[in-house]
Image (cartoon, rainbow, N blue to C red):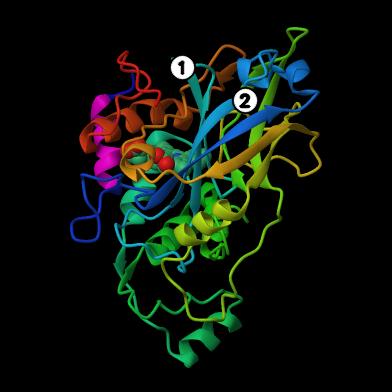
Amino acid sequence: MEDPQLVEDIVHALDLPPPAGSTKRRPVHTVGVGVQGHFVPSAVASGYCVAEHFQTRTDGKALKVNVRFSNGMGVVQEHDGWSDVRGMAVRFHLDDKRSTDLVAMTLPVFFAPSPKTFLEFALHARPAPCRRLTPWEKIKQYLKLQLPMPDPYPDQDERPNEGATSYADAHIWAQPAVLDASVIGAPVSYVRTAYHAVHTFVVTGSNKEKRYVRFTWAPVAGVLNKDPTKPPENEYLQSELKTRLENGTARFSLMMQVGETGDDFNDSTRQWPPHRKRIMMGTLTLESMPEDQQTYNEKLSFNPCHLIDGIEPSGDPVLHIRKDVYEYSSNRRGGNPCPFSGQGGTS
Ligand code: HEM
């Protein structure tokens, strides 16, 4: 059990006061949409990981999944066209009672190496008033080899960018994630961007070998962003996905990067070298968007520590505190019982 005060402080540091945010909704990744589909492991997956969802099924039944795609911001308005991190939370239903989760986002690295530094970061990166820089201010920044802050969107008067950047100026570990987040843009579809589970997990192979790994969902249709020079179009991501699934399916490959000696296993601000071995672990096929979004989106309670035999958390302290943070947040907003509550909650 993590320090309950720290857990509460972290969630409160993420909260935005109404009308921007709401404690009846998620404090981050507030706007989202739930979809359903199935997962098929690759032929080599079971050799690398003995967890049940990586075993070839002999009963002929598809392994069902619930997926929630989201915008990373903690605002209740659907600003799809704004540059923002996106989320993809997946629940694999092993049978009617048991499940396991994989929670991912579009940044490959995280903002802070520990819960306390994340709290500090979150307090600095609270949305603050923003303005358009004058052309002269921009030129001065370019001359100093600095990237000027982007112009605010037409209806944007507050944003976290300035606070996050000044924090990153003083804390080197925050720089990769803050830089990536500042240029991330908006995808043309929730299924045209890659999502990373960011932390290291430890998987056990069929020969009992343990490997330190990181997971990424790679979109089979490829990555494609909106043109950042065009005015942002809002409220298109959910309708785009609905139409796409009414006319067909969408697929993701689950890729597993295998860490080597010298890679950081307990700090998700540190990326691994890009040439690390990658294993294709399976294919996720999305099929439909249920009408009942209260059940299949708003009420769902994912948890990155909801794991099963064959996959363990690494020693990353951020991964460990997320277990209690997500449970606290889910209880507060009246989500389905968290997978750890002992009351089921696997729907
Ligand atoms: C200390 C670090 C972090 C904190 C405190 C935090 C906090 C939270 C909270 C409070 C929620 C709402 C949970 C709920 O009410 O169900 C949430 C949702 C989410 N977080 Fe994090 N988060 C952290 C790190 C991460 C990382 C590293 C990732 C990506 C790997 C991530 C991806 C997501 C996603 C995708 C959701 C939406 C889940 C859903 O659709 O229900 N978060 N986060």
Q: Quarter of the image for the C terminus: give it.
A: top left
Give the CA distance from mark 1 to mark 2. Answer: 13 Å
At which x and y percent is residue 161?
42, 64
The residue under label 2 is 62
Residue shown at 54%/18% (left/top)?
94
When the figure is inspected, residue 97 is found, relative to residue 201, above or below; the finding is above
Name which residue type carries label 1: Asp
Which residues are the magenta region? 4-13
Whether the residue carrying mark 1 lies under 8 Å from ligand 1 is answered with no
Residue shown at 65%/33% (left/top)?
214
Q: On the rendered structure, is 144 left or right of 6? A: right
At which x and y percent is residue 25?
26, 45
Looking at this rendering, what residue extends furthest in the bottom direction?
136
The residue under label 1 is 96
Residue 235 located within the stretch drawn in magenta = no
In this rendered view, identify the residue nearer to me: 209 or 243: 243
Name which residue type carries label 2: Ala
At which x and y percent is residue 57?
68, 16
When the figure is inspected, residue 117 is found, relative to residue 96, above or below; the finding is below
**Dot 2, how many residues are within 10 Å of its Cα: few (below 14), some (14-19), or many (20+)?**
few
Looking at the image, can residue 291 be seen? yes
When the figure is inspected, residue 237 is found, relative to residue 283, above or below; the finding is below
Q: On the rendered structure, is 240 left or right of 217? A: left
At which x and y percent is residue 330?
29, 33
When the figure is inspected, residue 326 is found, relative to residue 94, above or below; the finding is below
